[in-house]
Image: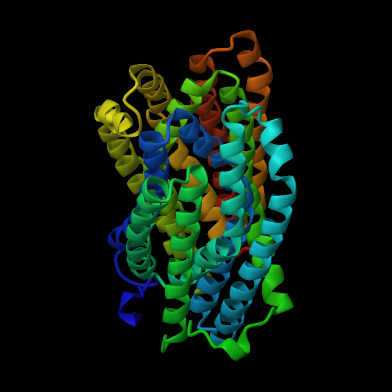
Amino acid sequence: MKRNNMDMLNGGIASKLLLFALPLAATGMLQQLFNAADVAVVGRYVGENAMAAVGSNSPIIGLLVNGFVGIALGANVIISTFTGQGNQEGISKSLHTAILFSLIGGIFITLVGEAVAEPVLRLLSVPPEVFPMALSYLRVYLLGMPIIFLYNFESAIFRSQGDTKTPLLCLMLSGAINVALNLYFVCVVGMTANGVATATVISNAISAILLFILLLHRTDSIRLEISKIRLHKDVLMMMIRIGLPAGLQSMVFSLSNICIQSAINKLGSNVMAASSAAFNIEILAYYLVNSFGQACTTFVGQNYGAKNMDRCRKIARYSLLLDVSITTAVALLILAFGRPLLGIFNENPTIISLGMTRLWFILAAEGINAVIEIMSGAMRGYGHSLVPAVLTFAGVCGIRIVWVYTVFRSSSTFYTLMMVYPVSWVITAIALVIAYLIFIRRLREHRTLPV
């Protein structure tokens, strides 16, 4: 496994960004394909209500997960920085703190989530015919939060060393099991949405256990030792300081999506089903966007630790160029095959037509979203994550919520609702570019920034 580690401090930048980002994107895409299998199985073998039940939970699950996944990104930045500094003790303390914190955080989210699951779904205006299956799916999924969090923190540890291949291989195995279990629980056992949720929890447990075992057998600086697992307050505070704003930035997307999902739910089960199917397709392009953002964060983090300031700025430029160009090409490819892809989930012509409406609004503007990810990712790599979080909250969450309660209220159509995505992205991207340029000017003036 050590051979999968990458030297981020020396050599070509663009090729290494690709070697880092593409397996990471493949991991996200593969994970989403397995999640899409949940929707496809219930859509095909249970019905549109079950399909809508799974889809209506996506924003909720995203909200619950993203806060702690942001802290996992904080662990990635801290370990990357210590790696650049050659600080072996710091790496070890960060690793063992991250593992324990992931389990504690997962248990906390499970308990809170189970307590608020029903009232949250009611606030989202989930239709009565969908509600029982939606609640059942959410309750089962919440039980798996500790292992989902553990997997994400373990993946962040591997990424800090430039290894994005190992988490991908583990996911390939567990994902294949997930698909098989989906069919078993739904087609053989006769379960509905709760069946695919159970399959997801089991497959995530397999991924988390595999990565845990591999960390135990590492021979380098990220070797896990059971006796050393504990919370180191100083490292944890650094992780939270960097990771919490990043998590909040991800959460504001989920908060705004919950608001949008509530509006979608009021448009009927066909719109719900179409939106769910389209989301499981469009998200593939987002994983490309996000993978280059995480690559930028990790590369900048290591080089900032080594005080390679000029290389840090080059990394941001290469990341932006690669992200925008590759994401745009993939988005156009998905649009070209949009209708047959939507047909995998449901063959209803109305649902396919509505799904294409969403795909066009999201994918045609995905390159703008890439700007948001890279500007945010670069600043996080320097340990400066509060400004992008605040700007994203205002530009994404604020605009989308205002849009739902003003523009959409005056014209309650799916078309009007979907317009908010490109509008909010454009405004947020402009704000983040300005913030990044100011940040870089400060960097040039002072030649250093606080960690």
Q: Position of residue 315 (x, y in %)?
A: 41, 57
Q: Is residue 140 above or below residue 124?
A: below
In-front residue for pair 13/217? 217
Q: Is residue 367 above or below residue 376?
A: above
Return the residue found at the far top.
Answer: 410
Drawn side of residue 24 relative to residue 242, left or right: left
Q: Answer yes or no: is residue 308 visible.
A: no
Drawn side of residue 313 relative to residue 257, left or right: left
Q: Position of residue 251 (x, y in %)?
A: 63, 45
Q: Is residue 108 above or below residue 100?
A: above
Q: Position of residue 286 (x, y in %)?
A: 42, 43
Q: How is the image coloured?
A: rainbow
Q: Answer yes or no: is residue 15 visible.
A: yes
Picture quadrant of residue 87:
bottom right
Residue lying at 35% horizontally and 33% vertically, measured from the top left? 345
Residue lying at 62% horizontally and 58% vertically, measured from the top left? 68
